[in-house]
Every structure is written in C-alpha cells, then in structure tokens.
Amino acid sequence: MIFVGDESERASPVQAPPACSVQQLLAACAAEMRRQAGAMAALDATLARLVEQMRRQVGPIEAALRLPPEALHGLQRADHLRQEVEGLAGVLELLVRAGRMDAMISTDLLRACAPLADLQDRLLSGHLPPTGGGST
C-alpha cells in the first residue's frame, strides 16, 4: 500500500482541554466513525469501478479468470467492512442522540442502525438484560 501525507508527521498535536464529558467523547467518536464510513464507501466505489473497467476491457469471463479467488473474497470483505463501519456510525449517532448514559435504547432501533446480522449479534450479545420471569 502507498501512504501519502502520513498524519503522524504533523508538527504538533491539536490543543485539547484536559478533560471532556463522556457525551462529548461519544459525539466525537460518532463523527469520526461517520468520517471513516464515508472513506470506506469511497474506497468500495473505487474498487468496484476498477473491477468494472477490467470487465469492459477483457470481458466478464476473462476478468473472473484473471482475478484469483482470494482477490474476489477481499473485495467482498471490503464491502462487508464498509457496511459494518456504516452500521457502527449509525449506532454511535443513536447513542449521542439518547443524551444520557443511562438511557435505554430499543433493540429495534439498534438493529435498524446496524443492518448486518453478525454486527447486530456482536453488539447485542451479553449486553442485554435477561427477559421474561425472574427478579427485576
């Protein structure tokens, strides 16, 4: 991979207050995740354009033969990661809108923000109170 303009080369760190609230940090994380989701979407679109260009140049069958299975799997994985990042961005934004750290968020809202079932499962596993009988 080629990296241009490495951010670690920045002359000095950004001035920041000595502390911030959980809500402020959560909002910053949500904004950063949304930024990354946009970058992943642009990368995904670029990869799709490259594959489409190859298909136009050599034909769909030849293009499929030229791309090794691990490359096709990598392209599918990149799209899956993009969807996960977009889902996490939505979940973080949902948390920010809740406004309170003890606010309850409906599982349906969470699932709507994160449309991939495996991501939903990771987010929800072990983090929901038991339902049904028992003490409250």
Image: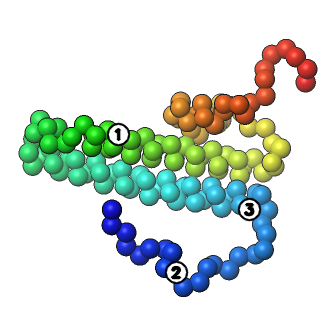
Q: Which quadrant does the N terminus fall into?
A: bottom left
Q: Where is mark 1, residue-wise?
A: 76
Check disc 3 and report the residue beneath it. 24
Q: Residue at x 49, y 79 (%)?
A: 9
Residue type at mark 2 is Arg
Please name which of the two marks, 1 or 3, marks the residue nearer to the observer.
1
**Residue 112 in view here:** no
Q: What element carries label 3?
A: helix
Instruction: Count neighbours of disc 2 (C-alpha within 10 A) and say few if under 14, some if 14 to 19, many if 20 or more.
Output: few
User: Residue 125 bears which disc, if any?
Assistant: none
- Distance from the alpha carbon under mark 2 to that under mark 3: 24 Å
Q: Viewed as shown, does residue 96 lie left or right of 79?
A: right
Q: Position of residue 27 (x, y in %)?
A: 68, 58
Whether residues under marks 1 and 3 lie with C-beta atoms below 8 angstroms apart, the answer is no
Image quarter of residue 75? top left
Q: Which residue of the protein is positioned furthest toward the right in this rendering?
A: 135
Structural distance between the alpha carbons of marks 1 and 3: 34 Å
Mark closer to the chain start, 1 or 2: 2
Q: Position of residue 22 (x, y in %)?
A: 77, 58
Residue at the far top: name it: 133
Element marked by disc 2? loop
Q: What's the residue type where badge 3 is placed?
A: Gln
| Residue labelled with disc 2 | 10
Residue visible at 33% across and 67% down in the picture: 2
The percent position of residue 130, horizontal first and vertical second, equals 78, 23
Q: Where is residue 3 in the image (x, y as percent from the top left)?
A: 37, 69
Using the image as rendered, state which of residue 73 and residue 79 is in the foreground: 73
